[in-house]
Image (cartoon, rainbow, N blue to C red):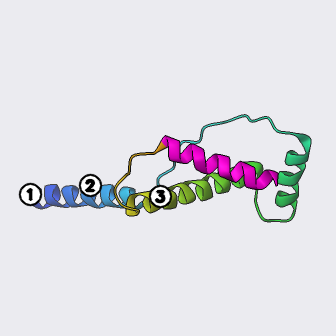
């Protein structure tokens, strides 16, 4: 019977570890203080009052998530665009000058 008890204890420990791994992981939250003009603060507060976000932290986390997604898309686009080419600085200057001239009239 002792062997059965040890086996049951090991199974119970295994199940406990497995169930703990299924629990959502709590990530540590850091605090970040930012400064912004009053009109930006008002804008964020309005979005919160409209019910789009729970808090300013929620709003900024969402902005960061969207920025990350956009950055990843741009990086993938760059990778898929093919091999890098040498930059022709003289050609680039000429194009920039032509654009400036066309904008000046």
Q: Which residue is mark 1?
A: 3
Residue closer to the observer: 25 or 6: 25
Residue 55: % across, % down:
76, 53
* Quadrant of residue 93 within the rendered picture: top right
Badge 3 or badge 1: first in the primary sequence: 1
| In the foreground, 81 or 6 | 81
| Residue displayed at 62% across by 51% down | 64
Magenta segment range? 89-105
State how far apart marks 3 and 1 are (Cα). Answer: 34 Å
Q: Distance of mark 2 from mark 3, alpha carbons?
A: 19 Å
Residue 77 is left or right of residue 7, and the answer is right
Residue 20 x, y percent position in the rendering: 38, 56
Earlier-in-chain disc, 2 versus 3: 2
Dominant secondary-structure state across the stretch colored magenta: helix
Instruction: Please give the count of numbered marks on the rendered protein.
Output: 3
Q: Residue 5's x, y, as percent? A: 16, 58
Q: Is 12 part of what is drawn in magenta?
A: no
Residue at 82%, 55% in the rendered image: 105
Residue that mark 2 sits on: 13
**Above-or-below relation of 91 to 5:** above
Depth check, mark 1 against mark 2: the one in front is: 2
Q: Is residue 19 visible?
A: yes
User: Secondary structure beneath disc 3?
Assistant: loop
CB within 8 Å, label 2 to label 3: no
Disc 1 versus disc 2: distance between alpha carbons?
15 Å
Which residue is denoted by mark 3 in the rendering?
Answer: 24
- Residue visible at 81% across and 51% down in the picture: 104
Left or right of 82? Residue 47 is right
Q: Nearer the viewer, mark 2 or mark 3?
A: 3
Let me know if residue 23 appears in the view: no
The residue closer to the viewer here, 20 or 44, is: 44
**Is residue 92 magenta-colored?**
yes
């Amino acid at each position: 019977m002792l062997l059965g008890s040890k086996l049951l204890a090991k199974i119970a420990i295994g199940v406990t570890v497995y169930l703990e791994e299924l629990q959502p992981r709590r990530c540590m939250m850091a605090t970040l203080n930012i400064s912004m003009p009053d009109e930006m603060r008002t804008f964020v507060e309005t979005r919160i009052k409209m019910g789009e976000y729970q808090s300013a932290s929620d709003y900024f986390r969402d902005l960061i998530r969207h920025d990350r997604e956009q950055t990843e898309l741009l990086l993938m686009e760059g990778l898929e665009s093919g091999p890098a080419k040498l930059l022709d600085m003289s050609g680039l200057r000429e194009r920039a000058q032509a654009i400036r001239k066309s904008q000046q009239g």
